[in-house]
Amino acid sequence: MTAGCTQDTPPSVPTGALWEGDDGESMRLEPGGVGVVEGLPYDTGSACDPTRFGTMSGDVAWEEIEGGELTLRQGDLEVAVSASRGPFAGDVIWRDVRVRPCGRESVEETVEMSRNYSQ
């Protein structure tokens, strides 16, 4: 017999944390649905063509859509961010995140960022 545990409710978005990518991308989310990002790619409406991605930098508003899923907004621009998932169905782990320039459902053209615990 094997037993496992899953989270009933996903953990809250860790505000004040810094996530960084390999190519200079970064994201810091603050309480109240605000934050600052650097170098996050977004789809310019060109059929998710990475050669035509724009880059989002500066102040953003963020909203948790569901456990582990965020939308970042800067004016009319929008980027989806997803937290890592653990081995059990409901586990949300905020150590690593994926930026999805083409929307929440896209799996291609994602940027991975890891939480910087040394800050």
Image: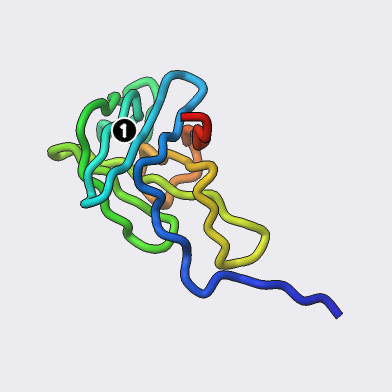
Q: Quadrant of the N terminus?
A: bottom right
Q: What residue would you read off at disc 1?
A: 42
What color scheme is it? rainbow
Q: Which residue is drawn at 22% across and 44% down?
A: 34
Q: In this view, does 105 lie to the left or right of 6?
A: left
Residue, far front: 119
Residue 99: x %, y % from top left: 42, 39
Q: Which residue is drawn at 50% across and 44% down?
A: 107
Residue 51 quadrant: top left
Q: Which residue is drawn at 77% across and 76% down?
A: 3
Residue, far left: 75
Residues packed near mark 1 inside 10 Å, few (<14), some (14 to 19) or many (20 plus)? many
Residue 25: x %, y % from top left: 40, 25
What secondary structure is marked by label 1? strand
Residue 10: x %, y % from top left: 47, 65
Type of amino acid under label 1: Tyr
Q: Residue at x 32, y 60 (%)?
A: 65
